[in-house]
Amino acid sequence: MRNIRTLGNKILFQFLEATSKNKRGTFENKTDWGFDIGNSFDETAKLPRWGVVVAIGPDVKEEGIVPGVKVFIEELKWTNSVDVDGEPVWQTDEDCILGIEAI
């Protein structure tokens, strides 16, 4: 993935696990026969999730939050995904990080 710089206390990340059988990590709700049920999302979206940091802004104060580290993100505290080099990336604020993987 190309070198990305974000602003302020923003953190760009990728989810470790996908939801709803969707490998891109976006939330969807489809029937077995392919009927798409609006913009709803599954219950796993309402839970904190693990992600891997891609980039951090210059105002991120926590020394342990660096690219490549796994972070535990507060539920529903992330943006919609955007594609960067064909890979989905999300954004959150430093204040929404609940924990960092102990190394």
Image (cartoon, helix red, strand yellow):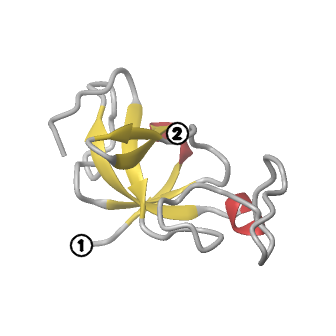
Report which quarter residue 35 is drawn in: bottom right
Q: Quadrant of the C terminus?
A: bottom left
Is 49 on the left or on the right of 20, as rendered?
A: left
Vertical placement of residue 22 versus 62, above or below: below
* Residues at discs 2 and 1 in contact (Cβ within 8 Å): no
Q: Earlier in the sequence, mark 2 or mark 1?
A: 2
- For label 2, the crowd category at 10 Å Cα-Cα, with few meaning under 14, some 14 to 19 and many 20 or more, is some
Residue 38: where, in percent of width, then height?
83, 49
Q: Residue furthest front?
A: 33
- For label 1, the crowd category at 10 Å Cα-Cα, with few meaning under 14, some 14 to 19 and many 20 or more, is few
The residue under label 2 is: 95
The residue shown at (22%, 32%) is 4
Q: Amino acid at mark 2?
A: Asp
**Res. 103 mark:** 1
Is 86 on the left or on the right of 74, as rendered?
A: left
Q: Amino acid at mark 1?
A: Ile
Secondary element at tag 1: loop
Residue 84: where, in percent of width, then height?
31, 39
Vertical placement of residue 5 versus 103, above or below: above
Secondary element at tag 2: helix
The residue shown at (37%, 21%) is 8
| Of residues 62 and 56, the one drawn nearer to the viewer in this rendering | 56
Residue 15: where, in percent of width, then height?
45, 60
Report which quarter residue 30 is drawn in: bottom right
Q: CA distance from mark 2 to mark 1?
A: 21 Å
**Res. 85 mark:** none
The residue shown at (41%, 31%) is 10
Q: Residue furthest bottom?
A: 32
Residue 85: where, in percent of width, then height?
26, 42
| Of residues 33 and 40, the one drawn nearer to the viewer in this rendering | 33
The residue shown at (61%, 53%) is 74
